[in-house]
Amino acid sequence: MSSSRLGEVGTASGNAELLIDTPSDVRFERAEVEGGTRVVVGHNGYQTSHGLTHARTFHLGFEGRALRGEDVLMAMSTDDRRRYDSAFSASNLQGVDYTIRFHLHPDVDVTLDMNGTAVSMALKSGEIWVFRVEGDVETSLESSVYLEKSRLSPRATKQIVLPGRAIEYSPRIIWSLAMPQATPSAVRDDEVEDLQMPVE
């Protein structure tokens, strides 16, 4: 299930659809750490339904060739654990299923490699990136769509899918996205963009 839902058409300006039932607590934290930058984001969008808060940690190396990530679902308070226990019981004690999805740009040529333990991504620039997951996680590729304002119809694309099952109060999945050392950086990687970072 999604942590938010689309409202009815016309509920926002310009006849757009407005997100409703959104998380009430969204967090962001950024810090310079040894070897790179760490960003931690999280929201409580599954707290009411399952007693779970989602947190994702990114660690980007200073060289820009490796991104490590960790996704955690946490039942943090006593009330959260009661809600989680209720959802766990409703699953006949099989665990609460969840799925992590990474939607890719249509220009990315993606293939499942190494007996499903890695995903190779070839960019138009000629760069190759490899996505891997730690542990016994059945990685797969599924169809997805990419929406952009300049097109009337969505563009077909792919998504990386990581299924899991929560049988404890804080399940986690650790993943990485890295450029092999033999792959040269594209020219675009040397261009500095003026990114607007949130001010704390």
Image (cartoon, rainbow, N blue to C red):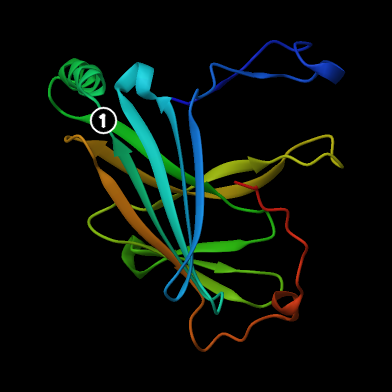
For this orientation, the residue located farthest to the bottom is 182
In this picture, residue 15 sits left or right of residue 189: right
Residue sitting nearer the eye, 28 or 127? 28
Q: Position of residue 121 (x, y in %)?
A: 55, 66
Q: How many marks?
A: 1
The residue positioned 33% from the left and 44% from the top of the image is 72
Q: Amino acid at mark 1?
A: Ala
Question: What is the x, y in percent for residue 78?
Answer: 20, 22
Q: Nearer the viewer, residue 43 or 90?
A: 43
Q: Is residue 106 left or right of residue 128?
A: right
Name the spot of residue 104 as percent of width and height, x first.
59, 52
Image position of 34 with respect to 196: above or below: below
Observer-nearest of 48 and 184: 48
Horizontal side of 174 relative to 95 (left or right) equals right
Residue at point 20% right, 15% down? 86
**Number of residues whose C-alpha sits closer than 10 Å to that of mark 1, classed few (under 14), some (14–19) or many (20 or more):** many
Q: Quadrant of the N terminus?
A: top left
State the SS at label 1: loop
For mark 1, what is the residue?
75
